[in-house]
């Protein structure tokens, strides 16, 4: 029998990107631009991408060992070039491992964009944890910076 647990955590990532807010926003809003940085060294299948308020994004990733991860997001608040708020759940081999609310804030700076991502998550049944999620998100932000 699975021991049930729910671990709550909030983390924040601040970055500066040498690109205008519109370009950073497009890296989230445009499916081709997002495909350049979102994911990793695994086989990834995009099932849906509707970047609008109430819209959903769904992807499934498969690693070489056969482990699959699902990402299912719903966009709640979108202010072009300024803010994105979304909820998302992650699954591993079909089991829900976390549910999060994420807020992305973009602010114009003299030489680009000041970027803040704040994530409030609940990590379920010991299948995921805040340290792993923050590290994975930091790696995604590194990939985003390279794609810009």
Image (cartoon, rainbow, N blue to C red):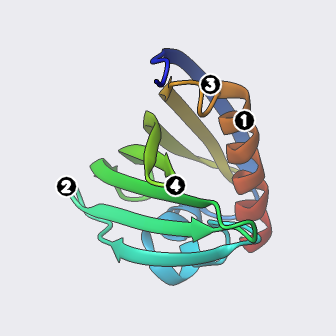
Tell me how many marks there are: 4
Question: Mark 1 packing: few (<14 Cα in 10 Å), some, or many (20+)?
Answer: few
Residue in the image at 66% along x and 37% along y: 133
Mark sitting on residue 116: none
Q: Residue 25: give x, y in percent of width and height.
A: 50, 62
From the image, state whether disc 3 or disc 4 is nearer to you: 4
Q: Secondary structure at mark 4?
A: loop
Q: Residue 144: give x, y in percent of width and height.
A: 70, 62
Q: Residue 76: give x, y in percent of width and height.
A: 26, 46
Q: CA distance from mark 1 to mark 4?
A: 17 Å
Give the mark nearest the N terminus, 4 or 2: 2
From the image, state whether disc 1 or disc 4 is nearer to you: 4
Give the mark nearest the N terminus, 2 or 3: 3
Q: Residue 32: give x, y in percent of width and height.
A: 53, 83
Question: Which residue in the protein does label 3 denote?
Answer: 11
Depth order, front residue of 8/104: 8
Q: Secondary structure at mark 2?
A: loop
Q: CA distance from mark 3 to mark 1?
A: 12 Å
The outermost residue toward the front is 1
From the image, state whether disc 1 or disc 2 is nearer to you: 1
Mark sitting on residue 93: 4
Give the mark nearest the N terminus, 1 or 4: 4
Depth order, front residue of 115/117: 117
Q: CA distance from mark 3 to mark 4?
A: 25 Å
Question: Which residue in the protein does label 2 denote?
Answer: 54
Give the mark nearest the N terminus, 3 or 1: 3
Question: Which residue in the protein does label 1 denote?
Answer: 132
Q: Are marks 3 and 4 in contact (CB under 8 Å)?
A: no
Q: Are marks 4 and 2 in contact (CB under 8 Å)?
A: no
Give the mark nearest the N terminus, 3 or 4: 3
Q: CA distance from mark 1 to mark 2?
A: 28 Å
């Amino acid at each position: 029998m699975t021991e049930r647990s729910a671990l709550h955590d909030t983390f924040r990532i601040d970055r500066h990107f040498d690109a205008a807010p519109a370009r950073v926003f497009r890296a989230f809003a445009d499916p081709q631009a997002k495909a350049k940085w979102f994911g990793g060294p695994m086989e990834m299948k995009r099932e849906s991408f509707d970047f609008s308020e109430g819209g959903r994004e769904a992807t499934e990733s498969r690693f070489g060992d056969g482990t699959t991860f699902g990402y299912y997001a719903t966009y709640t608040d979108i202010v072009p070039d300024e803010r994105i708020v979304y909820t998302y759940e992650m699954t591993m081999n079909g089991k829900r491992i976390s549910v999060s609310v994420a807020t992305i804030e973009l602010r114009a700076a003299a030489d680009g964009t000041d970027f803040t991502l704040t994530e409030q998550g609940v990590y379920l049944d010991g299948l995921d944890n805040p340290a792993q999620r923050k590290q994975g998100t930091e790696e995604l932000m590194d990939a985003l910076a390279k794609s810009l």
